[in-house]
Image: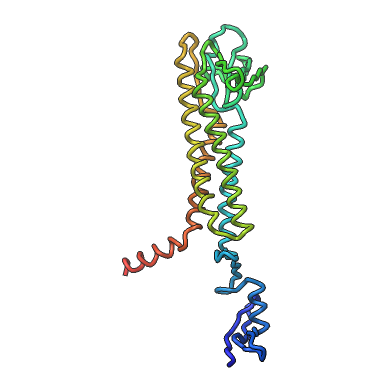
Amino acid sequence: MWSTFLVTDEEGRTGPATVGVVAPGGGPVQGPASLQGMMSGRSTFGGKRRRVTSTGHSISEAQEGKIKLAFFVAIVGVVLTVLGVGTEFWVELAPPKSFYNNQTCLTAHYGLWKGCTKTLWVADIDPERESCGPAELPGGSNCTYFKFFTTGENMVMFQKTTRKNLNVAAAMLALFSLFLMVMGAICITMALSKEIIFFLKPASVCFVLSGVTVLLSLMVFHQSVLAFLASDHTVPLHHELSWSVSCVGCAGAVLIVGGILFLILALPYSPWRRCLPQKESSNS
């Protein structure tokens, strides 16, 4: 008894194939088109190639493109985080430019790992600016790494003392965020290489948590700056958060958005298709 059906190959051509043929020896014989389709492990749906894995999960070409686009968004957040964490322009500290009553004034800036003091010429500072700075002006600079992570000593600048517990907590949160980003990147790589969409869910969790952790690190650092300023009031200081903080804040938002995109792509249905028919029916 011959059973025929239509088989669609990868190029979109349709042709008959036979299955269920019983050979004279009693064993089943399959048609060449059916055998080729089973060996290739691919079929087409809606004119687009669809790759099916042995576990039953599948990633279409359209899904793969969306995953790569969301991964690019997450990579932007990772780059911004590395740039912000690795630089020392988190906060700038400056006394009034006339505080020392000479031709130079002193400014300072620091980040998670090291702090820098810089001597500027008062003539180079904007006349309308009351405090010394900004730190980008040319001058003699002296940078040293914090001793929080070696001997446990606090740093003293402008007769004010840092709170090492808050500074160390901010640094550890930033490192943990980088670890979560690496884990999320590994999950996305596995999803694309093994063609298993399940890895998008842990990747989404990793990137969202990394974004939240980066923002928490920023908040803890700001509290450490406030505690540093409140430690002594002998020298009046003007402080402002610098461009490294902007990088870290943007990175946290971008990482959270990237994690949400991965979660949407991991859903078994499209949320837009479920919402649009309801809107159309309500309008009618």
Residue at 59%, 86% in the rendered image: 20
Image coordinates for residue 220, horizontal then vertical, percent: 47, 28
Q: Quadrant of residue 100?
A: top right
Q: Residue furthest bottom?
A: 1
Q: Residue furthest front?
A: 25
**Image quadrant in which the C terminus is located:** bottom left
Image coordinates for residue 221, horizontal then vertical, percent: 50, 27
**Image quadrant in which the N terminus is located:** bottom right
Q: Nearer the viewer, residue 249 or 239?
A: 249
Q: Nearer the viewer, residue 280 or 248?
A: 248
How many marks overall?
Answer: 0
Image coordinates for residue 6, horizontal then vertical, percent: 58, 84
Q: Quadrant of residue 124?
A: top right
Query: Is residue 252 positioned above or below 6 on the image?
Result: above
Q: Nearer the viewer, residue 127 or 199?
A: 199
Residue at 58%, 51% in the rendered image: 187
Query: Is residue 79 positioned above or below 115 on the image?
Result: below
Query: Is residue 168 positioned above or below 70 on the image?
Result: above
Colouring chosen for the image of the structure: rainbow
Drawn side of residue 188 relative to residue 278, left or right: right
Image coordinates for residue 236, horizontal then vertical, percent: 48, 13
Query: Is residue 48 positioned above or below 188 on the image?
Result: below
Residue at 61%, 70% in the rendered image: 49
Q: Residue furthest top?
A: 101
